[in-house]
Image (cartoon, helix red, strand yellow):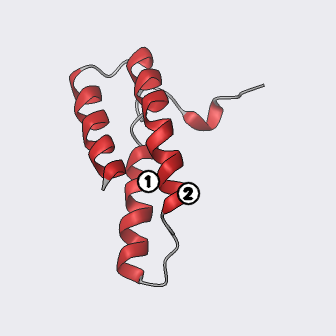
Amino acid sequence: MELYTAYLTAHESLSARKSADGVLNVMLWLAEPVERFSQQVLVMDDDVTLRQARVGLLQHIARLPDGVVDLRKVSTT
């Protein structure tokens, strides 16, 4: 539930001002809740409904930068 709440806050923040700086700040802010989620929650649960909901949430987060930043083209090196 914590990650979902963080996603809603991030989505609302970006809806008001979707810029490269805004996306970067939101994604940095989301890093910690995403990390906790990945450590505490079994995303690929045997329960199909849970699995779909959890994967869907992560997909929504991954789409937050759409239209501003293509994360596939961002390199850390």
> Exactly how many numbered labels are in the figure?
2
Placement of the N terminus among the 4 image quadrants: bottom left
- SS of the residue under disc 1: helix
Residue drawn at x 21%, y 23% is 16
Pointer 2 local density, CA inside 10 Å: few below 14, some 14–19, many at least 20: few
Q: Residue furthest right?
A: 77
| Residue holding disc 2 | 39
Pointer 1 local density, CA inside 10 Å: few below 14, some 14–19, many at least 20: few
**What is the three-letter code of the residue carrying label 2?**
Gln
Which of discs 1 and 2 lies nearer the camera? The answer is 2
Closer-to-camera residue (16/54): 54
Q: Are marks 1 and 2 in contact (CB under 8 Å)?
A: no
Q: Is residue 42 above or below residue 2?
A: below
* N-term mark: 1 or 2: 2
Q: Position of residue 53 (x, y in %)?
A: 35, 67
Would residue 74 be found to the left or right of residue 57 on screen?
right
The disc placed on residue 14 is none
| Residue holding disc 1 | 59
Closer-to-camera residue (2/17): 2
Placement of the C terminus among the 4 image quadrants: top right
Q: Position of residue 47 (x, y in %)?
A: 42, 84
Write down the quadrant of residue 68 in the picture: top left
Q: Is residue 14 above or below residue 39?
A: above
Residue drawn at x 37%, y 56% is 57
Closer-to-camera residue (63/43): 43
Q: Is residue 14 above or below residue 48?
A: above
Q: Position of residue 41 (x, y in %)?
A: 48, 64
Would residue 54 be found to the left or right of residue 10 on screen?
right
**What is the three-letter code of the residue carrying label 1?**
Gln
- SS of the residue under disc 2: helix
